[in-house]
Amino acid sequence: DVKVTQSSRYLVKRTGEKVFLECVQDMDHENMFWYRQDPGLGLRLIYFSYDVKMKEKGDIPEGYSVSREKKERFSLILESASTNQTSMYLCASSRGQGWVGSGDSNTQYFGPGTRLTVL
Amino acid sequence: QKEVEQDPGPLSVPEGAIVSLNCTYSNSAFQYFMWYRQYSRKGPELLMYTYSSGNKEDGRFTAQVDKSSKYISLFIRDSQPSDSATYLCAMSEEDYKLSFGAGTTVTVRA
């Protein structure tokens, strides 16, 4: 079974703090993702990485950065946390290599989430 | 207007009933359609994956896609209390990016 783990289930930080959220997957997946999930808004993609040191902005990258130094680890960084970044943060990974004829190669597997509160 | 619309519910049904969930979308380029189940305080897990239009069945779950109407559905037959969760629809064009609905919360009463 694919396992995606996130460093913290619950986190409370103060406005202006630098926050690190860590994600690790154990299935040698190429793609890794960071989403935030808010009531009524669904999941929104923050950043995506398709290889070590490679990243692409998602729909809402402002206020966030990411780091992928090793294939299994993808970090989300809030440079200066603000109250509007209070949310559930979900990490996901997928095998990659495209959809066609590849079954579930783009199926995304999610971690348990980190509920971040910024005071 | 959101790209993917999903009624948030909540939906409450008695055990054994058929649960019907649906999403509408505006992007005609979507070709891949998924349903995820998310239990409370957990990450989403993939339930069903469908390519283009048509039906797909997996046990008690049936997914339907009608691209002409830009409408997808998930049916759960013989619902069980363990089916109580939030169900998210998601869809994609050719690439990695998924667009999600907001999720429908379902409670199956014993």
Image (cartoon, grey):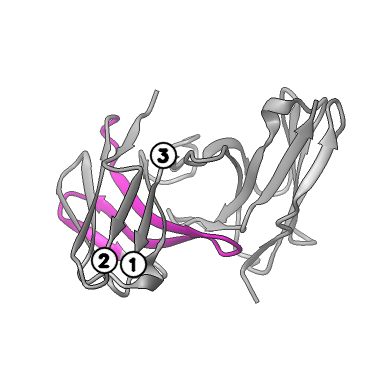
Q: Which residue is mark 2?
A: A14
Chain-order first, disc 3 or disc 1: 3
Asked whether residue B47 is drawn in magenta, I would say no
Which residue is located at x 56 percent, y 64 percent? Answer: A41
Q: Give the image quarter of residue A105.
A: top left
Work out which quarter of the rendered image holds the N terminus of chain B and state it. bottom right
Closer to the eye: label 3 or 1: 1
Q: Which residue is mark 1?
A: A119
What's under tag 2, amino acid-wise? Arg
Vertical position of residue B91 compared to residue B12: above or below: below
Instruction: Please tell me which residue lies in front, A107 or A77.
Output: A77
Closer to the eye: label 2 or 3: 2
Same subunit, tags 2 and 3:
yes
Vertical position of residue A11 compared to residue B43: above or below: below
Q: Give the image quarter of residue A7.
A: top left
Left or right of A82, for residue A112? right
Work out which quarter of the rendered image holds the C terminus of chain B and state it. top right
| Distance from Cα at disc 1 to Cα at disc 2 | 5 Å
Instruction: Please tell me which residue lies in front, A77 or A50.
Output: A77
- The magenta-colored residue range is A27-56
Which residue is located at x 61 percent, y 69 percent? Answer: B3
Q: Which residue is mark 3?
A: A112
Which residue is located at x 20 percent, y 67 percent? Answer: A17
**Image coords of residue A44 (percent x, y):** 47, 62
